[in-house]
Image: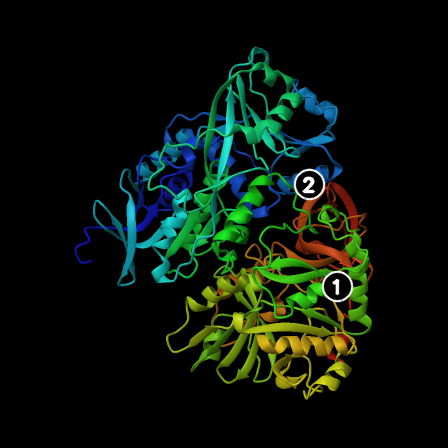
């Protein structure tokens, strides 16, 4: 490639709103040697036919942050870049037909207010005052967002483009990228107008992102997890009553969403724009007889209105004046969907110096925030907000074609659905199963997916209601509650067994492996035969990940981490790994059983040759039920116990032996209750890059005096001197029928002073528990605060940062 004539620091592939926003934010940060390649005109993909709605609502903290930033950016963008824009901030009304929906709205209001947004909850009469054409006889209430509205997608994209060009970045229209290659640690992006050498490539190719991702397969990439859905919206002609009302009050109607029926209705000029998300939806370009075309720029699918009839009829009943309007046109265009409906923003898994900013279902609403986040990833290697819910590495090797299509259909058809904590979306199960999966289900296991791995959430008995409908509640009560209590009591009083497939496990060996690890973690390392928790900070001192480190011998370590963290944590280790060391992913070779409770030692004495006198935080090789295994003297349940790590073919015999000796099977929901009582943190809940190690209460895992420097040391020392802005604390709450969900706001003297990072009921201490981040002066034992649970502020007591159950760890050490 010595003939490459062009170069840039970053090449972005794709000229939709997200790609151009990424270019604009890179240029704003001073990275002006960047070029964007678009095969046609800007906006030629999903952007040009997007409806242009700009909501802030989400029950995801990261998505809400991103959408809030977009609204703030768009308000001043036209003036900032000197480009005219039609941005209508109309406010929006989300209707609720049920109490459960109102609970969701109350939660979103609390989260929004914490982020500085003026979300509010309305009663039926207040709704009519803002939307006089609405029938409210069967409406319980609504969520009102004054910052919601709509924007012209083409104008938005052109404004961002103008800003990027003014700052010195380049946009090359009608110059399609045709492939990539690698030379001398740099990328060569191929185009029909010559190659471009660059340091970094960004895939922002919208519904062509999967095709672009294929170019990176030879360099460690994977099949990009997405499918394309057909989305239709209808534009209606002018309605005189709407025109007259808008003229009389001087503004448009709020954007209306009937989320329980599944559509939005927006005033478009003096008519309406109706956009349903129908259950009988249709994916495109997913079968051999319907291939992805080489170019679909500025094209649409044929109209397919039959599947929208129920939604149109409902909208006309809800807003009767809609029935007076003639239909002006139908837009039916492609929208990309990831399997969970969230976009892909961040490092491209397995590929050096490549990023993704693609698969945006709501690219206009999220485009501004996405550009900010992408620029932070590229420039700083991390983001202001923890963005795990959008990180491409959250999907590993289970997202094949059939899975992506099934989940896209499910997500699209339930676009406005509530995501209840007990509910499992049923499409595409059993992607990864343990060696005893069928046995677990036969015992009554009600399964959930964790990084694609099937695990029992709870164990039902004959006669228990295991229907999907039963799980659609925010409340604690359900057929699972008494079973979770029984499982927790079995672990407390006897011995329980949890089948736990999918732990991510890596083998690290080589000369100086221990010395290198000490430069990556904040604390120290265990000695041979011992285990320790290790925390990996970034340069800001924030919590990147937690791993269990088992020292097998000098410079020989096993690192174990969460199932969903497999690709994320492997890359975190590999990106600075010296050539002399070997890092091997052995996740697929082994599985795990947790056997725990005060009778665990007696059980193992009957079926193993292990040295059961070895202390807490030790590990050993042993034969269990006649099979080779590794026993680790740890328990996330906070009781005497061992983790059994065994080859896949050994697990069935060990599991059957443990059951035969009286162990009671328990599930993930019981484990969650048990770990909350011990104040054990969960990754990407309590442990995230939103918090530093000191804020997370992990002081005892930091060794400032060790010889090795580590990322974030200077930042943590500075924080230690000036004080932390938050501190970890354990709360008990006088809760009603629901426990505090993540990101519930905490109040004191009428002010928001913190947030819940995870919550649930503790069956050993018989209390509602929340792990939280609090203002430091309030994180002291005995402080009284209030926790907002679905709009209801409940009294809560702070207990400091230690466990509520067995605070001296006597049971663990027994």
430 vs 503: above or below = above
Report the residue marked by disc 1: 677
What is the crowding at mark 2: few (fewer than 14 residues within 10 Å), some, or many (at least 20)? many
Q: Residue 341, relative to residue 299: is it above or below?
A: below
Disc ID at residue 797:
none
Residue 32 placement: quadrant: top left
Report which residue position mark 2 lands on: 104
Question: On screen, 678 above or below 35?
Answer: below
Relative side of 793 to 758, left or right = right
Q: Is 806 situated left or right of 165 in this image?
A: right
Residue 721 in view (yes/no): no
Q: How far apart are marks 1 and 2 (CA)?
A: 26 Å
Quadrant containing the C terminus in the rendered view: bottom right
Indicate the secondary structure of the residue bearing disc 2: helix
Residue 115 lies, in percent from the top left, at: 60, 42
Task: Return the x and y of residue 293 as percentages of the image width and height.
Answer: 36, 41
Badge 1 crowding class, 10 Å Cα cut-off, few under 14, some 14 to 19, many 20 or more, is many
State the image coordinates of residue 260 (x, y, percent, origin top left). 66, 34
Closer to the camera, 285 or 731?
285
Image location of residue 88, percent across then percent down: 51, 25
Of residues 12 and 191, which is closer to you in this image? 191
In the rendered image, the quadrant that contains the N terminus is bottom left
Splitting the image into 4 quarters, where does residue 627 fall?
bottom right
- Sequence-wise, the earlier of marks 1 and 2 is 2
Dot in front, 1 or 2: 2
């Amino acid at each position: 490639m010595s003939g490459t004539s062009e170069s840039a620091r970053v090449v972005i592939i794709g000229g939709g709103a997200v790609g151009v926003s990424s270019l604009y934010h890179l240029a704003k940060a001073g990275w002006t040697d960047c070029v964007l390649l678009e095969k046609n005109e800007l906006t030629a993909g999903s952007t040009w036919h997007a409806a242009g709605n700009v909501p802030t609502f989400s029950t995801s903290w990261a998505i809400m942050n991103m959408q809030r930033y977009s609204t703030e950016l768009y308000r001043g963008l036209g003036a900032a870049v000197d480009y005219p824009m039609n941005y209508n901030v109309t406010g929006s009304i989300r209707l609720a037909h049920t109490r459960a929906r109102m609970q969701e709205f109350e939660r979103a209001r609390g989260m929004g207010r914490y982020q500085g947004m003026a979300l509010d909850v309305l009663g039926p009469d207040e709704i009519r005052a803002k939307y006089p054409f609405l029938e409210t006889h069967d409406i319980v209430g609504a969520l009102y967002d004054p910052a919601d509205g709509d924007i012209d997608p083409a104008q938005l994209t052109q404004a961002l483009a103008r800003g990027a060009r003014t700052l010195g970045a380049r946009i090359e229209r009608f110059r399609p990228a045709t492939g990539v290659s690698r030379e001398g640690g740099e990328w060569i992006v191929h185009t029909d107008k010559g190659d471009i050498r660059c340091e970094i490539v960004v895939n922002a190719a919208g519904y062509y992102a999967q095709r672009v991702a294929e170019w990176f397969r030879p360099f460690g990439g994977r099949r990009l997890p997405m499918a394309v859905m057909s989305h239709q919206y209808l534009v209606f002609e002018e309605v005189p009553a709407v025109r007259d009302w808008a003229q009389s009050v001087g503004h448009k109607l709020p954007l209306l969403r009937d989320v329980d029926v599944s559509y939005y209705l927006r005033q478009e000029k003096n008519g309406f724009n109706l956009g349903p998300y129908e259950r009988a939806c249709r994916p495109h370009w997913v079968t051999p007889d319907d291939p992805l075309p080489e170019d679909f720029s500025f094209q649409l699918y044929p109209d397919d209105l039959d599947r929208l009839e129920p939604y149109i009829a409902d909208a006309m009943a809800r807003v009767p004046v809609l029935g007076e309007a003639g239909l002006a046109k139908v837009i039916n265009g492609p929208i990309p969907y990831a399997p969970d409906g969230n976009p892909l923003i961040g490092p491209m898994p397995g590929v050096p110096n490549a990023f993704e900013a693609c698969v945006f279902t709501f690219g206009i609403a999220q485009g501004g925030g996405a550009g900010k986040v992408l620029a932070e990833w590229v420039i700083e290697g991390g983001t202001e907000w923890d963005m795990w819910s959008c990180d491409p590495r959250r999907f590993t090797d289970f997202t094949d074609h059939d899975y992506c299509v099934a989940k896209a259909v499910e997500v699209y058809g339930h676009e406005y659905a509530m995501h209840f904590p007990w509910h499992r979306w049923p499409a595409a199960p059993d992607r990864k199963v343990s060696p005893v999966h069928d046995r677990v289900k036969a015992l009554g296991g009600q399964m959930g997916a964790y990084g694609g791995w099937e695990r029992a959430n709870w164990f039902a008995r004959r006669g228990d209601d295991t229907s999907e409908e039963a799980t659609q509640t925010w409340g604690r009560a359900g057929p699972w509650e008494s079973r979770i209590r029984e499982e927790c009591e079995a672990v407390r009083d006897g011995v329980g067994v949890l089948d736990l497939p999918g732990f991510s496990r890596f083998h690290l060996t080589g000369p100086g492996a221990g010395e290198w690890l000490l430069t990556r973690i904040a604390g120290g390392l265990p000695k041979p035969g011992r285990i320790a928790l290790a925390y990996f900070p970034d340069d800001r001192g924030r919590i990147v990940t937690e791993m269990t480190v088992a020292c097998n011998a000098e410079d020989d370590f096993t690192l174990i981490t969460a199932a969903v963290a497999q690709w994320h944590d492997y890359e975190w280790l590999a990106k600075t790994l010296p050539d002399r060391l070997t890092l091997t992913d052995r996740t697929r070779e082994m599985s795990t059983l947790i056997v725990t409770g005060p009778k665990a030692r007696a059980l193992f004495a009957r079926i193993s040759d292990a040295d059961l006198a070895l202390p807490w935080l030790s590990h050993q090789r042993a034969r269990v039920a006649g099979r080779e295994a590794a026993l680790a003297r740890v328990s996330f349940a906070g009781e005497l116990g061992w983790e059994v790590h065994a080859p896949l073919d050994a697990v069935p015999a060990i599991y059957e032996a443990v059951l035969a000796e009286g162990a009671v099977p328990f599930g993930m929901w019981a484990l969650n209750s048990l770990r909350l009582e011990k104040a054990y943190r969960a990754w990407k809940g309590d442990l995230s890059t939103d918090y530093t190690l000191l804020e997370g209460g992990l002081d005892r895992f930091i060794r400032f005096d060790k010889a090795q420097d580590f990322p974030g040391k200077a930042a943590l020392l500075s924080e230690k001197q000036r004080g932390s802005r938050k501190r970890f604390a354990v709360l008990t709450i006088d809760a009603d029928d629901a426990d505090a969900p993540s990101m519930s706001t905490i109040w004191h003297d009428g002010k928001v002073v913190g947030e819940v990072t995870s919550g649930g009921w503790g069956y050993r201490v018989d209390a509602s528990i929340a792990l939280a981040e609090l203002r430091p002066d309030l994180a002291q034992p005995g402080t009284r605060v209030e926790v907002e649970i679905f709009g209801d502020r409940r009294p809560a007591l702070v207990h400091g940062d230690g466990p509520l159950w067995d605070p001296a760890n006597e049971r663990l050490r027994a």
